[in-house]
């Protein structure tokens, strides 16, 4: 059969194709290419490798996945090129790569309360199997350097030193931010400026009044624990999440100073559009039952990851509002426990625990939103996390929040894990920003879904983001607990790289019932209208050429 087309028909075919593509949103496809299970094994034979943070090195065209015992190197095809055991440096926390240099942060090997380090490795040498030969030097930073990131030009690194409280709630170290002026010729000679919060010691009452959560009897320098850093696109400012304090710190990178601490406020789950499911056992016979509803509860945003972008000449920050306790097991109590009582300003507790309202299983914060309350006579019911992502301006003021959109869409897609309803829901954990066809997108990694899942939103307009699709590993996948997300381009293609930390075994640190994994997606944007026009023009010309040939 011969198929013939006229120039007009060719244009109509292209027009129809363009219409179909436009109707599907910004992307033609978000395709999972592969998922590779981590290969690290502990000396006792138990799985001991968690893929927590991954980075792409364009020079060696290698994926570096950090977590657990070390760094795993993967090819773009998903095959494991090799592993590098880093336990001699301490507990690995983060990795960031610029121009063939991997900056890797480690907590102190002997005592996490002591200063940690950032070690520098040449990526090409590490890929070739150099191991120790790849080490180019190190610098000392603060306690528990939880996250490291390069500035856009590679002249500086910023490190969030969490100073995390250790087992049993012992408070050992202050939180801080290290700014490293990188010396590429001699990395160990890089100048480190570590910024602490001692200037806010003695101002704890004022900080609490503003909404910052600081436990009773704690100094600000101890209570403020930096979690994640985003550098503004213009390189002049950085914003640091202080997760457990429900606040952010603002850094002036021209003077290397902390210029302010901004409380992030409460989210009212009684408002329309903010509904949550507060229980993992509100079905018949205490079974799971997904039942979002308005409840008289406030959530503290408590963001983990943060990323920045520019819109209309202004800087905006996207924050993943995960929520986190200072010390698990001591900060949080189930609402139905006997130790929780309510003040007379609230309805009687017995009227709030029916399945139609707050279920007894909901985890609430013992000491309230600002850290100095108690479980007896609560004047407000406060839980961890916003179950959302937010956009804030350069001052930390709220511009937009996704409300319950992440959870509503996760439920519709069969991704929602109702066993987490009583805690922090889908737990937005990671975030990365990327651009395609002149639009700006945010990929939001969700830690607690039925399988690894990342929600993608168009955030070009910071006051009106739109949902664009899911990157998720599929119903039969064993990938669990999305931790880090990053995007990169290679050979004209756009990729989304996802680190899944796996499921740990309670009471057995470092061992996993489900191994960590690394997943790669390819994101194919819908071609711009100009592309269709060129294609149509080309087909018109082709049809004209064919007509001349027939003549």
Image (cartoon, helix red, strand yellow):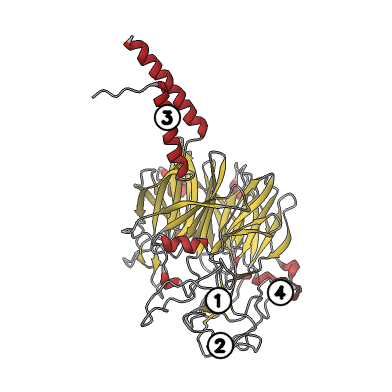
Rounded to the nearest angstrom, the CA distance separating label 2 from label 1 is 13 Å
- Is residue 104 in view from this perspective? no
Compare residues 125 and 241 and report the one nearer the observer. Answer: 241
Between marks 4 and 2, how big is the CA–CA gap? 26 Å
Q: Are marks 3 and 2 in contact (CB under 8 Å)?
A: no
Element type at marker 4? helix
Q: CA distance from mark 3 to mark 4?
A: 64 Å
Q: Which residue is mark 4?
A: 208
Image: 133 above or below 540: below
* Residue 32 shows in this picture: yes
Which labelled disc corresponds to residue 349? Answer: 2
Q: Which mark's residue is nearer the viewer, 3 or 4? A: 3
Q: Earlier in the sequence, mark 4 or mark 2?
A: 4
Q: Residues within 10 Å of mark 1 (few under 14, many from 20)?
A: many
Q: Is residue 446 left or right of residue 147?
A: left
Residue identified by numbered label 1: 295
Single out the mark in the foreground, 4 or 2.
2
Badge 1 or badge 3: first in the primary sequence: 3
Q: CA distance from mark 1 to mark 3?
A: 53 Å
Closer-to-camera residue (69/388): 388
Task: Kindly report which numbered mark, 1 or 3, lies closer to the viewer in this rendering.
Answer: 3
Residue 17 pos. (x, y %) = 42, 35
Is 129 rendered above or below residue 91? Answer: above
Looking at the figure, which quarter contains the N terminus?
A: top left
- Mark identifier at residue 435: none
Query: Pointers 1 and 3 in contact (CB under 8 A)?
Result: no
Q: Which residue is mark 3?
A: 12
Q: Could you tell me which residue is drawn at 56 percent across and 69 percent down?
A: 385
Reading the chain from its start, which is encountered first: label 3 or label 2?
3
């Amino acid at each position: 059969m011969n198929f013939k087309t006229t120039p007009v028909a060719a244009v109509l075919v292209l027009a129809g194709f363009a219409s179909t593509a436009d109707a599907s949103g910004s992307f033609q496809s978000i395709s999972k290419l592969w998922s590779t299970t981590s290969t690290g094994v502990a000396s006792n034979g138990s799985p001991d490798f968690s893929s927590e943070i991954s980075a792409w090195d364009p020079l060696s065209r290698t994926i570096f996945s950090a977590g657990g015992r070390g760094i795993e190197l993967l090819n773009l095809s998903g095959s494991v090129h090799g592993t590098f055991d880093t336990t001699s440096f301490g507990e690995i926390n983060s990795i960031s790569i610029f121009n063939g240099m991997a900056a890797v942060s480690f907590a102190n090997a002997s005592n996490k309360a002591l200063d940690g380090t950032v070690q520098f490795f040449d990526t090409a040498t590490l890929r070739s199997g150099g191991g120790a030969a790849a080490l180019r030097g190190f610098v000392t930073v603060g306690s528990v350097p939880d996250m490291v990131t390069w500035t856009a030009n590679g002249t500086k690194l910023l490190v969030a030193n969490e100073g995390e409280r250790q087992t049993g709630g012992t408070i050992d170290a202050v939180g801080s931010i290290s700014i490293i002026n990188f010396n590429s010729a001699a990395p160990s000679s890089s100048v480190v400026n570590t910024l602490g919060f001692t200037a806010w010691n003695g101002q704890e009452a004022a900080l609490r009044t503003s909404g910052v959560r600081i436990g009773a009897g704690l100094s600000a320098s101890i209570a403020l624990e930096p979690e994640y850093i985003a550098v503004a696109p213009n390189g002049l400012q950085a914003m640091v999440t202080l997760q457990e304090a429900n606040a952010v710190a603002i850094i002036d990178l021209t003077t290397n100073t902390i210029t302010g601490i901004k409380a992030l406020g409460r989210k009212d789950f009684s408002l329309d559009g903010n509904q949550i499911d507060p229980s993992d056992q509100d079905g018949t016979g205490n079974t799971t039952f997904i039942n979002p509803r308005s409840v008289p509860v406030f959530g503290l945003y408590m963001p983990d990851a943060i990323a920045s972008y520019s819109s209309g000449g202004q800087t905006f920050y996207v924050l993943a509002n995960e929520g986190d306790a200072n010390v698990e097991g001591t900060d949080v109590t189930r609402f139905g426990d006997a130790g929780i009582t309510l003040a007379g300003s609230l309805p009687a507790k017995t009227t709030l625990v029916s399945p139609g309202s707050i279920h007894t299983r909901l985890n609430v914060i013992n000491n309230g939103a600002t850290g100095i309350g108690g479980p007896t006579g609560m004047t407000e019911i406060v839980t961890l996390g916003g179950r959302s992502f937010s956009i804030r301006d350069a001052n930390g003021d709220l511009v937009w929040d996704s409300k319950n959109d992440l959870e509503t869409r996760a439920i519709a897609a069969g991704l929602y894990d109702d066993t987490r309803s009583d805690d922090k829901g889908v737990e937005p954990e990671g975030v990365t920003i990327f651009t395609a066809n002149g639009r700006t997108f945010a990929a939001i990694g969700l830690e607690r879904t039925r399988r690894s899942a990342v929600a993608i939103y168009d955030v070009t307009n910071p006051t009106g983001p739109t949902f664009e699709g899911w990157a998720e590993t599929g119903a039969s996948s064993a990938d669990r607990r999305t931790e880090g997300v990053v995007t990169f381009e290679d050979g004209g293609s756009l990729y989304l790289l996802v680190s899944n930390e796996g499921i740990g075994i309670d009471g057995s640190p470092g061992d996993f019932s489900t191994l960590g994994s690394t997943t790669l997606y390819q994101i194919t944007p819908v071609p711009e209208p100009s592309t269709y026009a060129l294609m149509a023009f080309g087909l018109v010309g082709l049809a004209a050429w064919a007509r001349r040939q027939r003549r």
